[in-house]
Image (cartoon, grey):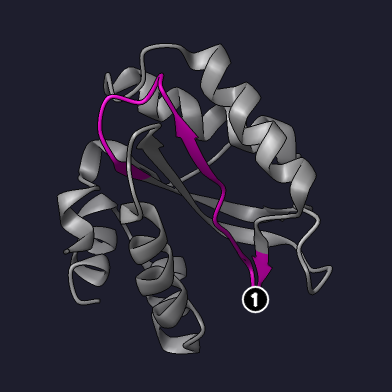
Amino acid sequence: MEVNEFINQNLIKMNLTSEDKDSVIKEMIEIMAENEIITDKEEVIKKAMEREEKGTTGVGKGVAIPHVKSSAVKRPAVAFGRSEKGIDYGSMDEKPSYLFFLITVPEESHDEHLKLLAKLSRNLIHDDFRNSLLEAKDEEEVMSVLENI
């Protein structure tokens, strides 16, 4: 399983405009809707918010990985977003998040998202990996960083 099976340049937003957790989730889900990965934006937003109520997906070190499993998702996908100023995401380390990975999978998916989550997490603990994403100039550079995990 390669990350680029789930993400492409159309699913990358270099400059998120959101200023809080709820709006960043909605902005990331909008990317999925624009790319026809989800069929019901409101349903996916509801599921994402329900997931956040169980515990933050702000994993710390400037990273948040919200994830959604829903029948409104057509196929597994990952959207990437970056915030220049950082967003208070309620992260475990209480610091702002700058890098966001939204993982969406269909309801009937088994554990694809968990494998992907684990693979991303293993790489995101490394400062050089996170810095490469923070310093990437465009979607192509983000893709080349992600293709190497």
**Quick check: can you spot residue 19?**
no
Which residue bears the numbered disc 1?
Answer: 61
The residue positioned 45% from the left and 11% from the top of the image is 40
Helix, strand or loop under label 1: loop
**Quick check: can you spot residue 137?**
yes
The residue positioned 29% from the left and 40% from the top of the image is 76
Three-letter amino acid code at the position of disc 1:
Lys
Q: Find residue 78 and report its horizontal and vertical position in percent.
A: 35, 46
Q: Find residue 146 and report its horizontal and vertical position in percent.
A: 26, 67
- Against 69, residue 143 (above or below) is below
When asked about the image quadrant of residue 31, the answer is top left
Q: What stretch is highlighted in magenta?
A: 59-78
Q: Find residue 20 and report its horizontal and vertical position in percent.
A: 76, 39
Q: How many marks?
A: 1
Q: Quadrant of the C terminus?
A: bottom left
Say whether residue 68 is magenta: yes
Q: Find residue 117 and report its horizontal and vertical position in percent.
A: 43, 63
- Graded by Cα atoms within 10 Å as few (under 14), some (14 to 19) or many (20 or more), the crowding at tag 1 reads many
The residue positioned 24% from the left and 36% from the top of the image is 10
Judged left or right of residue 125, residue 128 is left
Say whether residue 126 is magenta: no
Judged left or right of residue 49, residue 118 is left
